[in-house]
């Protein structure tokens, strides 16, 4: 989940380093390609800062390759198989890790992850968390006087008050909403989707398009994150956009990165995964990716984060449950939305 700053730009330069011939030679010899989602590597995302910090440590070149969203990321890896040029895939989440493992394309990371600390804990020999957050309905306070207080309120609310959501087939937030609905409604999820469909303005391929429509005023609500309002408070000094607190709890997302078996430089790829767990990486997350850090930081979270919705209950399926049921639940969603 990522935002484009309106008042600041990133001016990143490695001139002092690349002017040194030995460093330039090493960088030319050592290149790590990382597949991730596009907003992570935008000029306003963590990508430029992470690239600068990691290249200073590794004496290498970090090459980003972006796709639309996390589900699209997994689809690309499946399509390319062992011909993928990347060493690391960054931007899947725990809802996808079992399916990703089943491809046989990922290798155990073999790094120390003792610094990683996410709610509920997440330990895995293949995937390393780098941030986490909670899905939420974000609303425009200038348009919505009474925001929904539960999924039930959202599903059964005024059809004239629209929401933009993301597609669960291509987007991790879209998949998150699908799982959230299933967690709360169970066998009655199809009927809930049919009701909610009257409130849905459109379904976008990814988060960026959905949030853009929302901030452009096309709809008063959007599926996003509890941390989204922090961006507006910090970057725009505005309390206009807020997240609704839902009584059933909020579905949790833990974003992860993994090592490909066919990595051209396995040691360099592992070095990057270890780097993710340190402050040089984690310090970039809250105010560029607008998520919560998965490991210790050297800096303090902005005060705006103290004002955010703090879910009473974190909802989450196991990766195995998602892998077993994702296709059936998406088919159920597709059928319900087409009625």
Image: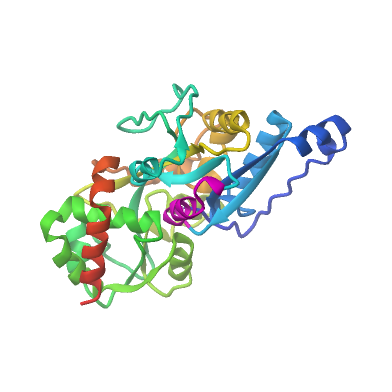
Residue 302 % position (x, y): 50, 40
Q: Main secondary structure of the magenta part?
A: helix
Q: Does 253 sit above or below residue 270?
A: below
Q: Nearer the viewer, residue 7 or 206?
A: 206
Q: Quadrant of the C terminus?
A: bottom left
Q: Quadrant of residue 221?
A: bottom left
**87 relative to 163 in the view: left or right:** right
Foreground pick, 241 / 201 = 201
Q: Reply yes or no: does residue 181 show up in magenta.
A: no
Q: Residue 233 in the image: x percent, y percent?
A: 49, 52
Q: Is residue 294 above or below residue 181?
A: above
Give the percent coordinates (x, y) of residue 91: 47, 46
Answer above or below: position of 119 versus 133.
Answer: above
Tell how many labels.
0
- Residue 327 in the image: x percent, y percent? 27, 57
In the rendered image, residue 80 lying in the magenta stretch gets the answer: yes
Seen in the image, is 203 located left or right of residue 85? left
Q: Which residues are magenta?
A: 69-83
Q: Residue at x 57, y 58 (%)?
A: 4
Q: Is residue 194 left or right of residue 228?
A: left
- Colouring chosen for the image of the structure: rainbow
**Residue depicted at 69% across the width and 30% down the height:** 58
């Amino acid at each position: 989940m990522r935002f484009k700053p309106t008042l600041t730009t990133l001016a990143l330069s490695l001139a002092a380093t690349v002017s040194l011939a030995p460093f330039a030679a090493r960088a030319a010899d050592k290149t790590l390609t990382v597949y991730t989602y596009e907003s992570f590597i935008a000029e306003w995302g963590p990508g430029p800062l992470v690239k600068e910090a990691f290249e200073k440590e590794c004496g290498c070149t970090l090459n980003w390759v972006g796709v639309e969203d996390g589900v699209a990321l997994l689809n690309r890896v499946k399509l390319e198989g062992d011909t993928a040029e990347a060493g690391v895939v960054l931007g899947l989440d725990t809802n996808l890790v079992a399916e990703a493992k089943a491809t046989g394309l990922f290798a155990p990371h073999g790094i120390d992850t003792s610094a990683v600390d996410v709610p509920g804990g997440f330990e895995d020999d293949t995937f390393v968390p780098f941030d986490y957050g909670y899905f939420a309905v974000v609303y425009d306070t200038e348009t919505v006087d009474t925001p929904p207080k539960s999924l039930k309120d959202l599903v059964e609310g005024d059809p004239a008050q629209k929401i933009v959501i993301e597609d669960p087939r291509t987007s991790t937030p879209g998949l998150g909403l699908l799982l959230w609905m299933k967690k709360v409604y169970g066998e009655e999820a199809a009927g809930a989707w049919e009701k909610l469909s009257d409130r849905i303005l459109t379904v976008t391929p990814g988060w960026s398009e959905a949030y853009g429509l929302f901030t452009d005023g096309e709809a008063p609500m959007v599926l996003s994150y509890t941390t989204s309002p922090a961006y507006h408070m910090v970057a725009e000094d505005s309390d206009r956009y807020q997240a609704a607190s839902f009584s059933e709890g909020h579905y949790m997302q833990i974003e992860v990165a993994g090592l490909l078996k066919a990595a051209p430089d396995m040691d360099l790829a592992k070095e990057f995964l270890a780097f993710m767990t340190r402050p040089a990486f984690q310090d970039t997350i809250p105010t560029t990716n607008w998520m919560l850090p998965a490991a210790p930081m050297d800096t303090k979270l902005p005060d705006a984060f103290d004002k955010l919705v703090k879910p009473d209950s974190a909802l989450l399926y196991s990766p195995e449950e998602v892998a077993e049921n994702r296709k059936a639940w998406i088919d159920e969603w597709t059928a319900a939305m087409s009625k």
